[in-house]
Amino acid sequence: MNVVANGALARARGANRRGSTSAVALEGADIPVAILGFLKPKTPAMAVQRAMLLLLVVAVIGLAIANPVFRSPANLLNIIQQASMVGVIACGMQLMIISGGFDLSVGATAAAAGCLAAYVSLQMGVPVGIVAGLVLGVAIGSVNGSIISKIGVNPFVATFGTQAVITGVMFAMTNARPIAPLPEAWRELGFYNIGGLTTSSMVFLATIFAMYLLLRFTLFGQHIYAVGSNKIASRRSGVRVDPVIIAVYAVGGLTAAIAGILLTSIAGIGSPQAGTTWALLSIAAVVIGGTPLSGGAGGISSAVIGIFALTVLNNAMTLYSISAFWQPAFMGAAVLIAVGYEASRRRRKA
Amino acid sequence: MLQAPSHKSAKVVRLTPLLSTSGISKNYDGVHALQDANFHIAPGEIVAIMGDNGAGKSTFVKILSGAHPASAGSVEVDGLVTSFKSPNDARRAGIETVYQDLSLAEDLDVLSNLFLGREEFHVRFGGLSILNRRKMAARAADLLGEIGVNVPGVHDLVSGLSGGQRQGVAIARAAGWGSRLIIMDEPTAALGLQETAHVHDIIRGLRDRGVAVLLVSHNMKQVLELSDRVYVFRRGRIVCNLTTNKTGADEIIGFITGARD
């Protein structure tokens, strides 16, 4: 996304230099040039993202005008809170999808990390419990990344397998029962807020910012795009492909663990049943946000747009008392439209 | 299209070749893909490799580019024996390869492709090193201008470029960084007439700057037009080393098919 947006801008400037009549008027004006870039997306995936962003903005403005409850600060903060846990995972998923893969085990990893953090906190306190949960997340992610890069198993099979192993081990060890009661410090963490912005909301916003910096400015971010776009070319150019992939999944596992620990802090229990829908929700968010599953493209904006589109939809359905059973149907339709549009445009181009 | 080889007579071939091989062999599971290959190339020289499919050309090229180790024999760079364990080793010795598939990351822009694996930084800190895109963009524009590659802009995605422009980017990536030998595998196989002519100009430009070019090609017209010398491979052996302006298509084809020995 970052690379692409720059390109669109540069092209708009290029049009300026060539002196086409429509562009001459924009000489030296950065904002109109940016708008020109926005209206002429470079790739079908970018077009999906623009359309979804437009739809989201229109929906939010429309709902804010039509419904006083929706526009109340408490509800807007609530939307961020509701988006936060799957949102953190979607940020990790964004990296994995750019690298050309994805991770079906994030829900199981989140539950396992949340349970381990809860269990360890009983003996050694909450901070040590949190560290243990995070370490577990990174470890599971590294195993996923190693299976995918070193052994060459495709991401679907690899993470489907680890998901089943994690869930099985966790259920066996906990007898599928929640870990409770937990130290009071958990709930203090979960319900801490600054001006209504909860811990998990703040962690979500910080994760978005960190991932933005990572993808936009660092060598690691650059190499995630390169590996996702063309693995062989990256290797030939001296990119250390395997460590990049392992690190991507380690970061993905870390975001899953963060989400699981946040859930433990809010629920006040360590639940082995948690997060069963999170993998598919977070993949859906990234795809709806306009990132192709083929890899090499997209930005953190995809995860953010996608997760807020899903959450606002949910919120609106609650406000208008529409059955929550419709939600998966809307989500599925949005995924199909996003992927279908991108695929059809790509085929027409080829 | 054929141009007179006026420059060739004036060429000074240095005593020490840039790169030479002696007795290079390669076996794959007991199959002799390449036997006793003796080869040399000097700075500013365009040397072509021709031969039928399976004659050993690509095996030889893979050994020079560091993709595969040789089973026997030695490679000398500047008269010193070296061994390449990886493409990075070959690259450090100044040997770059332009692959037939071009090996470009299509979803990335021109700039990112040119600098892939050799990024410039504001701050160095492993994977968290901060990229210096401004510096890379300026150098990329210079490099493309120097080599004579026309692309709309360094921030354009490679997926939006024409075949000729992509070839240009791939060559520019190989030619930057002070490389001394560029191996090109069928550089114009996918290109139209005009684009081919442009790529030929780029190759001559490299030669004039003292870069050695190893051209793997099936295109007889291209070989006669561009190269100073031609090595013909047949059944895993180098069967001849011809000076281009003292030979012709008939003799070369004779060696390729085995009508001559």
Image (cartoon, coloured by chain):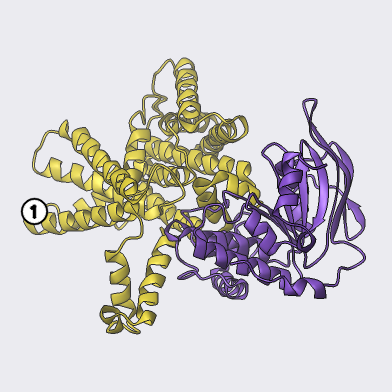
Chain colours: A yellow, B purple
Residue drawn 83% across and 42% down? B261
The residue tagged with tag 1: helix, strand or loop? loop
Residue at (12% x, 33% y) in the render: A323
Task: Locate residue B109, reporting x and y percent.
Answer: 49, 61
Percent position of residue B138, x then y? 57, 75
| Chain identity of mark 1 | A
Q: Position of residue B91 (x, y in %)?
A: 74, 56
Please identify the quadrant where the N terminus of chain A is shown.
bottom left
Vertical side of B247 occupied by A313: above or below: above
Instruction: Give the quarter of the image for residue A278.
Output: top left
Name the residue carrying label 1.
A67
Which residue is more in the foreground, B63 or A231?
B63
Vertical order, B101 against A174 (above or below): below
Mark 1: amino acid: Asn
Look at the image and tell me whether residue A45 can be seen.
Answer: yes
Residue visible at 56% across and 74% down?
B141
Nearer-the-camera pick, A328 or A43: A43
